[in-house]
Structure formats: structure tokens, C-alpha cells
Image (cartoon, grey):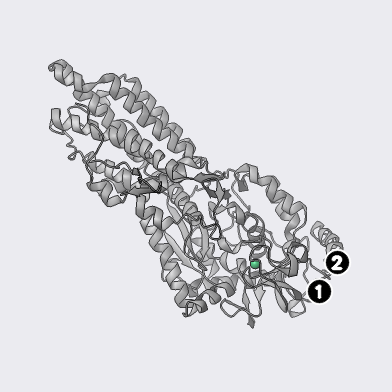
Amino acid sequence: MTSRVQNPIQNRLWLLSFSTSSSSSLCNSVSLKKTRFTNRTRFTNRSLFGKRMSWSSSRRNLYCTCSTSRGSTMDSNTSPSSGRQNAEPFVITTPLYYVNAPPHMGSAYTTVAADAIARFQRLLGNKVVFITGTDEHGEKIATAAAACGCSPAEHCNVVSQAYRTLWRDLGIAYDKFIRTTDPKHEAIVKEFYSKVLANGDIYRADYEGLYCVNCEEYKEEKELLDNNCCPIHLKPCVAKKEDNYFFALSKYEGFLGKMLSENPEFVQPSFRLNEVQSWITSGLRDFSISRASVDWGIEVPNDAKQTIYVWFDALVGYISALLNDGEQPNLQTAISSGWPTSLHLIGKDILRFHAVYWPAMLMSAGLQLPKMVFGHGFLTKDGNKMGKSLGNTLEPTDLVQRFGPDAVRYFFLKEVEFGSDGDYSESRFINTVNAHLANTIGNLLNRTLGLLKKNCQSTLAVDSAIAAEGNTFKDAVEMLVTKAKTHYETLALSSACEAVLEIGNAGNLYMNQQAPWSLFKQGGAASETAAKELVIVLEAMRIIAIVLSPVTPSLCLRIFNQLGYTEDQFDTITWSDAKWGGLKAGQVMAQPKPVFSRIENQIEDGNGGETVKQGSKEKENINQNKSPIEV
Ligand SMILES: [Zn+2]
């Protein structure tokens, strides 16, 4: 659904002839809108099945009518890591990505961040449902398929698979991958539609306007360039008239405003709340939820000539994804598996759909609202907006193949403040991962293990808890672990990485101050002290491997392997294992092997071109460490 948003308002329509005798404040806002109706858009109000939209004060609870309702939209504490009493799962979603093109860096960034958050929640011992998937309907998909001579279904299979391949390469551990062409999703969408219809919030109206085929949306004249050209595609829009079904978003203006003022945490980061509130106060317009001329979509219930359009299809995927294999595809079953979501993670370009449209749709269907919508920022490259026409896109598949998943994940989560915009440049990328992952963390581990091998047969002499009694370095590590936890909980992912990095920095400082290599040379009691110091540093490495595992899981597994643990042991760690004292006397470490090799930055002679050699995960594993081991 992400790349559908080129113009965030699909249809700038005002509702006409919205008559009701209700005195609710919602209807007052509707009457105001009539005066803002633009003259080139003509409606004929033909409410479905002779039903006028009605609203009465005695109508059912807006927010939740399902039998498992807790009777409120949100928990009083809307921290994403809270509100899961009664063993509610932590449900996190990425957008369902639109398959008109292969995955781009923005999608990869959202998904990496979601994966880190999901992994952190699993470390806390919470049941997690991490949902991602692909949005596969619409005219653009049909056109893209035709262009490559395949059917829409074949096209969707290929692109959807490209997403899954990239997620595998990036180490994304999702629980559910929903495709909007999945029959179970179609069933849920139809049921959802029918609920909204039964609530009187869908009506049929003629619409006439200028339509951009590429955007798949009607445009307002004032936003078009000369010759009615779409400002995005620079191609003329075509006059189009069709009757569509509309969702009565305007009806929910008051309720959305009230919900946000009562639950300001709903929109995160908090600085995005004002924007959402201003959309609502400036007036919400009903939006078209069907197309008469698009075949590649889910049929509108009771009208086979129309298909359900864009958001009304894709957003419901967050619910249908919850269905387990073999379950009956109905809303109640899906909802009982984890609705509402704890966190919708999205790019800021689709905030309106998630913080305005979607809650209104859910209110209309009588379902609970998600607990939080977090809109992260955009990525730029070398300070410039990325775009195909600018020829400066950043291909995630290329990036992960060249540098491996850990480097990609770490760079974007550490170097982009989560929620704000961030920039990628190759030199900064290489410098950052080399300094932090290869040097601060990787080299500290490697040189410590080298000393342990040489002087202690790779075996720990003493329990780490005993070795660190009264040790201030240990206190510093514990404090930083607490700090990292708080940062993860508040989705401050960059700060969480920073806290881990500080453990590495403190470890390097400690190592250099204690200089165990000198102590070993002295022999006797000094050697015993040196052996103890190695245990202390390795215990810090063990803790780093746990606390950084949401961000760089495969790197942290390699650290764990180096410390003599198995993959199974790594897979069962929890946050409480980050408490000091895990390493015990007698534990045998693996042969020292670099866990993260430096990425070599090579300037070619003569032509000034820059090439980067190696960096794949395999190479990271087999290359010899080039860093000096102090002995
Ligand atoms: Zn366009």
C-alpha cells in the first residue's frame, strides 16, 4: 500500500445531499461541508438500498461491539510494550507493500525496524505476531502485468516473492505474510465491507472528474499542471465518469477528534499528532472505495460490476493476516487471534490513511482501534531525495548482497533517529559499520578470545559473577543495559544501539586499562588476575550479543557461537539473560574468528571511481581478522 501514495488524498470529494434529521454534532459538520463543494465534481446521491445515512444517539458503542470487547478504544497506557495483560500478543505490522514494483529501500527500512521491535518484544518473553505482506490489487498491477506479458496473478507472485526473498536476506523474522489476493483475505474484506454498509456508512454516487491512470485516482483541477497533467506523472489526466461507492468518512470527524484528544499517544512520534489533528479539524471528506472499471480486485458485495478500491482492501489485511491456517475466514475468528494491533509501523507518507481513514473504518465496523500508529521519516541519499528519475535510488537487495544483513540493519537503525528523516551515503555507511561493528565490538571480542586461547586454552577460569565482584565496569554495563531497554521500549532504536555501543567502548577502555597481556607476562597472581579480566570482558560481550540481537541478530549469533554457545541456546535467550553472571568457570570458547570483517573502501586509481570489495556474510565468516591482536 505504500507506493500507492503519491497524492495522499485519493478523491477530493465532498459529500452532497447528506440529509439527516439527527442533531448529532457529526451531522452539523456535514452541513458545513456542502458549501465547500467544488463545482467540477457532480454527485447524485443514491444511497444504497434506499437507506439514508443515519446517526442516532442511541446507536451502538462506536468503538467496539464485538463480544470480546473491553468497551474502550485503547488501553489507558498505550506504550507499545504495555497493554498486553491477559497474555494478549504484541501485534506489530508493516504496511502491506504494493507490488507494482520490486521492494525499495523505504520498505526495507520499515520492515527492518519492525523486525527489531518484534525481536525485542520476544526477548521480553511476550508472544509476538509480526505481520507483513503485499497489497496486490488495482489497475496499476494489471497494467504492470500486461507490460511484461503475464497475468496479474503471475506478476503478483513474482513481486510478492521478491519481497519474501529480501526479507529472508535481511533476517526478517515475520510471523504472518498476508497477500491481498489470498481468498481468506477477500472473505474478510467482504465481511468488513458488509458491516460498514450495514452501519449506513457506504453510499453510491456518480463521480465525474479528471483521472490519472498512473496514480489510479481522481485529481482536483487546482493540483494539475498545464493540459491537466498529473504533477507526479506529467501526463494528461483523462476525463472519467463512473459511479462509485463512498465511505462516509466525514461522519467520523468528531469521533476521531475526540479519540485523539483522549489518546494523544495514538499517533507517534508525538510531533506528528498536530498534523493529524489539523487534517481532522480542516474537514474530512468522504472517499471512494470502489472502481467500476477495474477488474483486478475484490468484487463489491452485491455489485459484481465494481471492485473494492485500494485502502478499503489493503488496510483490512491487518486483520485477515491474523487468521491461522485452517481457520474459517471470518472477522470474529481473525480478531480473536490478536486484534487490535499494538503498533502499526508506517512511513509518514501514509499517516493519514492509518491515523484517520483506518480508525474511522474500524469505528464504522464496530471494531477496536489499534493502540498506536508510528510514522517514521524518509530516507535520502547523499542529501538528496531518492527517485528513479533522479537515478539515485538505493537498492536494498544490492545493499544486503554487498554488505550483509547486519551492516544494513545496524546502519539504518543506529544512524537514523527513528521517526525522523535520515540520510544514507556509502562512505558514512562503511565508516559507521566498520567503526562500531568491526572495531568496537568485533575486534574487542577477537582480541580477548585470542588472549584467552594463548594463555588459558580458551577456557574461562572463573564465574563471571565472581570475577566482577565490586567491579565498576560491571556496574556501568548493567546501567547501560537498563538504558537500552528503556530506549527499545520507547522505540528509540538509535539510542538503544548507542547504549550497546557504549558497552563496547567501555569494554575497550577497560581492556586497555587492565592490559591483561602484560599481566600474563608477569605470571603468578598477575596471570590469575589477567584470566579474570578476560572473563569480565567476555561477559560484557555476551551481554552485548543479547542486547543488540534485535538489531543485528546474525552478528549476535556469531558472537554467541564464539563464546561457546549453540544456536539453540541463542534462540532461547531472553532479556533477563542480559543480567551479569551468565558465563561460568570451565566454559570453553570457540576458536577466535572475526564476527564482522571490515568493509574495505577502495579508491580506484586514475578514474576516481570508488569500489567496495567484499562484505558478504560468508566472507565475514571466513576472512581472517586484519586487526592486530594485542599480546
Ligand atoms: Zn499521476
355 relative to 304, above or below:
above
Mark positioned earlier in the residue sequence (2 or 1):
2
In the image, what residue occupies the spot 31% across and 41% down?
Answer: 598
Residue 326 appearing in the image: yes
Quadrant where the image shows the N terminus: bottom right
* Residue furthest front in the image: 606
Considering the numbered disc 1 on the image, is that residue within a helix, a strand or a loop?
Answer: loop
- Image coordinates for residue 81, horizontal then vertical, percent: 50, 44
- Image coordinates for residue 438, horizontal then vertical, percent: 32, 38
The amino acid type of the residue labelled 2 equals Ser
Which of the pair 178/438 is nearer the observer? 438
In the image, what residue occupies the spot 57% across and 45% down?
Answer: 78
Determine whether, in the image, residue 71 is placed left or right of residue 152.
right
In the image, what residue occupies the spot 74% across and 62% down?
Answer: 223
Considering the numbered disc 2 on the image, is that residue within a helix, a strand or a loop?
Answer: loop
Which residue was labeled with disc 2?
21
Residue 410 sits in quarter: top left
Determine whether, in the image, residue 43 is placed left or right of residue 98.
right
Q: CA distance from mark 2 to mark 1?
A: 24 Å
Which of the pair 500/463 is nearer the observer? 500
The circle on residue 42 is 1
Quadrant where the image shows the C terminus: top left
Q: Residues within 10 Å of mark 1 (few under 14, many from 20)?
A: some
Residue 473 sits in quarter: top left
Residue 544 sits in quarter: top left
582 relative to 299, above or below:
above
Q: Quadrant of ligand 1?
A: bottom right
Residue 174 appearing in the image: no
